[in-house]
Amino acid sequence: MGKYLVSATVRRDESSKFLGDLKWGTFPAFSLGWRMSDENFMKNARLFNDLKIRGSWGKMGNEAAATAQNAFTTFGSNRRSSYYDIAGTQNAPLDGFTLTLLGNIFGQWEENTTVNVGFDATIFNNSTDIVFDWYQKKTDKLLFNPEVEGIRGSQRPAFQNVGGIENTGIDVMITNRATISRDFHLNNSVTFTTYNNNISSIAPGLKFFDFNSPANEANRIGGNATRSYVGSPLNTYYG
């Protein structure tokens, strides 16, 4: 009868970036709504013309960060690091191969879990609308390629499921419709938003990482302008 609202979905996704059973990810989601203003006990509540309480929970997968060859160890050739002049001619180095990517056979889907609770209300004789939302988004098994020791040379590490990030916040919107005269109507909207970001984990033994800008985008302080710590927001200013 329009009082109770239910929605549910399930996604089943596969990615060729992962191996075996880890290719697959199952991601459910559901939402619930209750239009309280249609209940008998709300008939005499003159303040509310309409009131709906709602909540949702859902999980989504992400594999975009990982490269297509993430699961495989690859080799490549580079004149500066893998060629070698075996004959000592000083002008005819021979091709050589070096490890370029150390694959990760245990890579899997990154998971984003979102919770949202809120309400929609119309009050004061249908003149004012209020929309309120509280949300939390947690990313687990975050795909991250941590820095490796310099002794490993030019090899790149594969993306691993080691990181975690959490976002929380509140969104509020209040809209008022006023009739000044028969020919003049005024609509006003006010919005309020909070947003909090926190790094919950990066990698075993790693408490922070820096974002290194390309050489042609060097900043004026001559070093990293931001650093990402466990327990702090992404890209905290650092000097």
Image (cartoon, grey):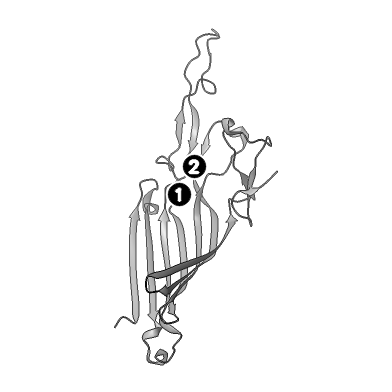
Q: Which residue is mark 2?
A: 158
Residue 109 place in picture, x, y as percent = 43, 53
Q: Residue at x 53, y 13 (%)?
A: 85
The quadrant where residue 125 appears: bottom left
Three-letter code for the amino acid on which mark 2 is drawn: Ala
| Label 2 element class | loop
The quadrant where residue 1 appears: bottom left
Mark 2–mark 1 distance (CA, rounded to whole Å): 9 Å
Residue 14 place in picture, x, y as percent = 34, 52
**Most foreground residue, 72 or 125:** 125
| Label 1 element class | loop
**Most foreground residue, 141 or 86:** 141
- Counting other residues with Cα less than 10 Å from the Cα at mark 1, is it few (<14), some (14-19), or many (20 or more)? many
Against 46, residue 122 (above or below) is: above
- Mark 2 in CB contact with mark 1 (< 8 angstroms): yes
- Counting other residues with Cα less than 10 Å from the Cα at mark 2, is it few (<14), some (14-19), or many (20 or more)? many
The quadrant where residue 182 appears: bottom left
Three-letter code for the amino acid on which mark 1 is drawn: Gly
Q: Quadrant of the C terminus?
A: top right
- Indicate left or right for 199 with 41 as reference: right
**Label disc, if present, on residue 107 of the rendered structure:** 1
Q: Is residue 206 visible?
A: no
Residue 86 place in picture, x, y as percent = 53, 13
**Most foreground residue, 225 or 124:** 124
- As drawn, the residue found furthest toward the right would be 239
Q: Is residue 100 visible?
A: yes
Q: Residue at x 46, y 85 (%)?
A: 47
Residue 75 place in picture, x, y as percent = 46, 30
**Label disc, if present, on residue 46 of the rendered structure:** none
| Labels 2 and 1: the sequence-earlier one | 1
Q: Residue at x 51, y 61 (%)?
A: 138
Against 141, residue 41 (above or below) is: below
